[in-house]
């Protein structure tokens, strides 16, 4: 198991797994001085009060919480978001409200989940042609519904 060093603002909550086999750790809103209302069709950057040092060769993916999506139509706008291993600023979560009613985010609300994942860099080689495949240039929906 890898370790991630984190720094918490006073009163912030560290990400936490809700069960032993959870893939994602819940991430909490850091709003000690109030709350943020996200109006229908709008998005907002929600602070978490955490900074982290992710080991090189890894990323932390920011993903929606299924309960917020199902019950409130609230999701993470840039899903999955990526926190790179060289980022040291405060983690912020961009939530969007797809419902038709305002949604209020309060201090310590669980707003997203963080998934720790290995990632590799690639070398992008410029060539004049690509090898042929059965799918070829078929795009969205080209393999059926």
Image (cartoon, grey):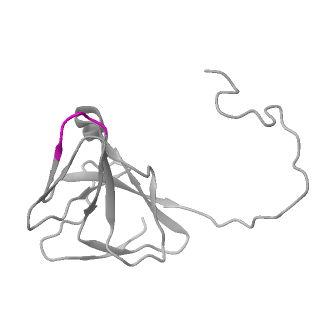
Quadrant of image for the N terminus = bottom left
Apparent side of residue 98 relative to residue 84 in the rendered image (left or right): left
From the viewer's perspective, is residue 81 above or below residue 89? above
Q: What residue is at 33 percent from the left and 68 percent from the top?
A: 91
Judge whether residue 124 is colored magenta: no
Q: What residue is at 65 percent from the left and 67 percent from the top?
A: 121
| Coordinates of residue 30 in the picture (x, y in percent) | 18, 65
| Coordinates of residue 9 in the picture (x, y in percent) | 19, 76
| Coordinates of residue 43 in the picture (x, y in percent) | 31, 51
Q: What residue is at 12 percent from the left and 59 percent from the top?
A: 107
Q: Nearer the viewer, residue 139 or 112?
A: 139
Apparent side of residue 82 relative to residue 95 in the rendered image (left or right): right
From the viewer's perspective, is residue 90 above or below residue 138? below
Quadrant of image for the C terminus = top right
Q: Residue furthest left?
A: 33
Apparent side of residue 30 relative to residue 43 in the rendered image (left or right): left
From the viewer's perspective, is residue 69 above or below residue 26? above
From the viewer's perspective, is residue 79 above or below residue 85? above
Look at the magenta stretch and give its main secondary structure: loop
Identify the magenta region.
98-103
| Coordinates of residue 50 in the picture (x, y in percent) | 27, 71
Q: Residue furthest top?
A: 145
Q: What residue is at 83 percent from the left and 31 percent from the top?
A: 134
Q: Nearer the viewer, residue 138 or 67?
A: 138
């Amino acid at each position: 198991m890898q370790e991630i060093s984190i720094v918490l603002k006073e009163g912030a909550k560290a990400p936490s797994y809700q069960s032993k086999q959870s893939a994602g750790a819940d991430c909490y809103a850091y709003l000690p001085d109030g709350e943020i209302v996200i109006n229908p069709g709008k998005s907002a950057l929600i602070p978490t009060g955490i900074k982290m040092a992710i080991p090189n060769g890894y990323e932390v993916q920011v993903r929606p919480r299924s309960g917020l999506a199902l019950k409130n139509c609230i999701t993470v706008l840039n899903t999955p978001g990526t926190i790179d291993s060289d980022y040291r600023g405060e983690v912020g979560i961009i939530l969007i409200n797809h419902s038709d009613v305002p949604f209020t985010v309060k201090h310590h609300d669980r707003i997203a989940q963080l998934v720790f994942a290995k990632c590799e860099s690639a070398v992008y080689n410029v060539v004049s042609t690509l090898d042929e495949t059965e799918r070829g240039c078929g795009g969205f929906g080209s393999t059926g519904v």
